Image (cartoon, rainbow, N blue to C red):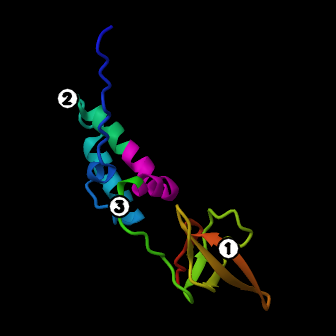
């Protein structure tokens, strides 16, 4: 019986692929991706054999880092950054259009300090509508800073 050699897959750091740091914002990730996609696109670099492979690597990095949940799952085992809450008690927030909540698009105020689980922070938000206050629980990715 011959010797079986298991090849270890050395995955390149997605932050390194995009040329950004682990603390990069969603906007910085998007800008880095667009810049690299423009520079490295195979149609623009037809003579370079590695262009297609490089573009696949850039797309894979962007797919993971642009999705908040996939990014946290990627970051956790690598020990990237200590997660800190985006909003504090008393912060004004807007329920994102991507939220499954019927309150999407409305603004509210964070009632309590956020609670952290393994993947995200959870916020209790008071939303005023027609003189009544409704309290809802939202994951961090469902909230954004309001445009005032």
Pointer 1 with pointer 3, Cβ within 8 A? no
Q: Is residue 112 left or right of residue 134?
A: left
Task: Identify the secondary structure beneath mark 2.
Answer: loop
Pointer 1 with pointer 2, Cβ within 8 A? no
Question: In the rendered view of the protein, which quadrant contains the N terminus?
Answer: top left
Q: Quadrant of residue 76?
A: bottom left
Between residue 114 and residue 30, name the one nearer to us. Answer: 114
Residue at 53 percent across and 65 percent down: it is 120
User: Dot 3 surroundings within 10 Å: few (below 14), some, or many (20 or more)?
Assistant: few
Mark 1 and mark 2 lie on one chain; the one further toward the N terminus is 2
- Residue behind mark 2: 47
Task: Identify the secondary structure beneath mark 3.
Answer: loop
User: What span is colored magenta in the figure?
Assistant: 60-76
Residue 80 got which mark? 3
Residue 137 highlighted magenta (yes or no): no
Vertical placement of residue 104 versus 1, above or below: below
């Amino acid at each position: 019986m011959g010797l079986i050699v298991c090849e270890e897959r050395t995955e390149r750091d997605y932050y390194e692929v995009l040329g950004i740091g682990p603390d990069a914002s969603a906007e910085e990730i998007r800008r880095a991706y667009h810049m690299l996609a423009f520079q490295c696109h195979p149609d623009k670099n037809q003579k370079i054999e590695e262009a297609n492979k490089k573009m696949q690597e850039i797309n894979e990095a962007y797919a993971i880092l642009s999705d908040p949940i996939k990014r946290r799952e990627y970051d956790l085992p690598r020990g990237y950054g200590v997660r800190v809450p985006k909003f504090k008690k008393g912060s004004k927030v807007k329920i994102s259009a991507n939220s499954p909540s019927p309150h999407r698009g409305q603004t509210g105020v964070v009632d309590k300090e956020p609670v952290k689980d393994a993947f995200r922070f959870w916020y209790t938000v008071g939303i005023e509508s027609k003189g009544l206050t409704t309290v809802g629980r939202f994951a961090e990715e469902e909230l954004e800073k309001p445009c005032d």
